[in-house]
Image (cartoon, helix red, strand yellow):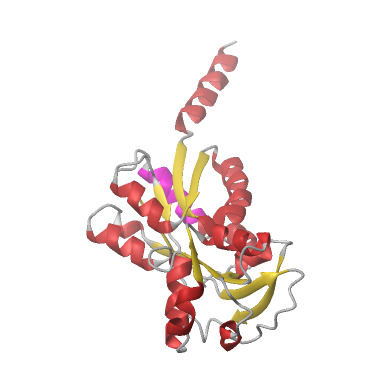
């Protein structure tokens, strides 16, 4: 009987250690994180509760005091601003992933867009981008188009969306002729095809930094989850979805 109560006490202690971690993560991470979380939960006993949206929206939520333990952004700009204002734990920050941009069209489209310059043809009346003024995927796309001298010619055709998944959905639905999204988003869709991939050498450096939120109620658990995201087990899943995992 004493052994039973000892085991019960140890089980209760283990359960007490398990924590709920609230992670705010860029919308483009939805599918990969959905596979990573169960593996992490099985290993640690912690439960991961995600909120996915555009990184700019998530950063605003952190500023407004929304409950969060960790933030994984799709660009450095959002994380830099939070760090400057002391809203993340700077020592916990690390780069987790990278990505590339692609031009996508509907699966049945006959448009030939094997070069960004072909986006200027009259047949491309609407070009879906995540909001190029605020959302990382759209900001990256705008910077790239400006770099190659096409932004001025294309900006009047841009249909801004709330996040990269919404830009993908606009192409899937046929509401626009083309879109620029992350390669990883195009990879999970059966309704679009990649017309052109913008190599990491030619396109912008896309960074996904992660950090513990300063007001986290579970900073140690949040740090442990971010460490797991850099593990080989998580990296294998990220690679499966097309992300670039840094050494």
Q: Position of residue 26 (x, y in %)?
A: 48, 56
What residue appears at the point 65 percent right and 66 percent down from the top-left corner?
186
The quadrant where residue 95 appears:
bottom left
Residue 238 in sight here: no
Q: Quick check: 148 above or below 22? A: below
Q: Is residue 235 left or right of residue 212?
A: right
Asked whether residue 225 is drawn in magenta, I would say yes
Q: Is residue 59 visible?
A: yes
Quadrant for the N terminus, please.
top right
Could you say which quadrant of the image residue 89 lies in?
bottom left
Is 54 colored magenta in this rendering?
A: no
Compared to 23, does 115 lie above or below?
Answer: below
Of helix, strand and loop, which mostly describes the magenta segment?
Answer: helix
Find residue 57 and report its horizontal and vertical position in percent.
39, 53
Residue at image location 45% in from the left, 82% down from the top: 151
Direction from residue 163 to residue 215 in the image, left or right: left
Residue 55 pos. (x, y %): 42, 57
Magenta stretch in the rendered image: 219-228
The quadrant holding residue 244 is bottom right
Q: Nearer the viewer, residue 28 or 72?
A: 28
Task: Depth check: give the residue in front, 90 or 134.
Answer: 134
């Amino acid at each position: 009987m004493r052994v039973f109560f000892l085991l019960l006490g140890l089980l209760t202690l283990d359960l007490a250690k398990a924590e709920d971690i609230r992670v705010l993560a860029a919308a483009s991470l939805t599918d990969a994180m959905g596979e990573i979380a169960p593996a992490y939960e099985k290993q640690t006993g912690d439960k991961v509760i995600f909120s996915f949206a555009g990184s700019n929206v998530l950063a605003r939520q952190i500023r407004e005091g929304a409950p969060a333990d960790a933030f994984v952004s799709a660009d450095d700009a959002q994380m830099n601003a939070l760090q400057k204002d002391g809203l993340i734990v700077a020592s916990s920050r690390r780069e987790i992933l990278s990505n590339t941009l692609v031009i996508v069209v509907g699966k049945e489209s006959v448009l030939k867009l094997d070069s960004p310059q072909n986006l200027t043809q009259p047949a491309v009346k609407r070009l879906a981008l995540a909001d190029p003024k605020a959302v990382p995927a759209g900001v990256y796309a705008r910077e790239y188009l400006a770099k190659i001298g096409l932004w001025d010619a294309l900006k009047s055709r841009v249909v801004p969306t709330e996040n990269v998944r919404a830009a993908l959905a606009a192409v899937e639905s046929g509401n626009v002729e083309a879109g620029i999204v992350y390669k990883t988003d195009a990879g999970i869709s059966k309704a679009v095809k990649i017309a052109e991939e913008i190599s990491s050498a030619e396109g912008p450096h896309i960074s996904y930094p992660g950090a513990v939120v300063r007001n986290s109620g579970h900073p140690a658990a949040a740090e442990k989850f971010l460490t797991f995201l850099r593990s080989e087990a998580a990296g294998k899943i990220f690679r499966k979805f097309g992300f670039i995992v840094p050494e």
